[in-house]
Image (cartoon, grey):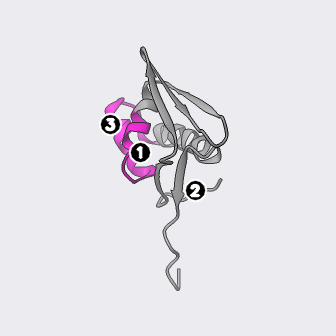
Amino acid sequence: MEMSQNAVLQRNLSILEAAMGEDHVLFHPDTGLYCHLNDVGKEVWGMLAAPHTRMELAVALSSRFAADQATCEMDTLAFLDKLAQTGFIRVAEPPVQPGQ
C-alpha cells in the first residue's frame, strides 16, 4: 500500500488487544490474524488511539527511543504498511486539492 506522508492513520476499532505478561497481542476478529508487538510496536499502537500521520509518529518515536529520524521513519513506515495491509489500522489520505 502506497502511503503519503500526510496520510492520517488510526487504529481499526474492531481490533481486540490483550496484554499477556510483558507481551502485547492484537487480534483481528474478521480475519483471524494476530500481531505480537514489541516495545516500539506497543508505543506505535498506543499513539494510534488518536489520528496521526506517519511523520508525526516517526518524529515522536525518534525522540522517545533516541534514534535518527530517517531510520525511524523507514522502520515505522514498514511496520505501518504491514498493519494497514492486514487491516489492523485505517489509512485516510487527505483529499487532493485542485491544481496540485
Closer to the chain start, of discs 3 and 1, is: 1
Tell me the kind of residue under disc 2.
Met
Instruction: Tell me the CA gap for discs 3 and 1.
Output: 17 Å
Tell me the kind of residue under disc 3.
Ser
Q: Which residue is mark 3?
A: 63
Q: Position of residue 10 (x, y in %)?
A: 45, 51
The quarter of the displayed image where residue 49 is located: top left
The quarter of the displayed image where residue 39 is located: top left
Q: Position of residue 13 (x, y in %)?
A: 47, 47
Q: Main secondary structure of the magenta part?
A: helix
- Residue drawn at point x = 47 percent, y = 32 percent: 17
Say which of marks 3 and 2 sits in front.
2
Q: Position of residue 31 (x, y in %)?
A: 67, 40
Q: Secondary structure at mark 2?
A: loop
Q: Secondary structure at mark 3?
A: helix
- The stretch in magenta equals 43-69
Tell me the kind of residue under disc 1.
Leu
Viewer-nearest residue: 81 or 36: 36
- Residue drawn at point x = 48 percent, y = 43 percent: 73
Residue furthest to the bottom:
99
Q: Which residue is mark 1?
A: 48
Instruction: Tell me the CA gap for discs 1 and 2.
Output: 16 Å
- Residue drawn at point x = 65 percent, y = 34 percent: 33
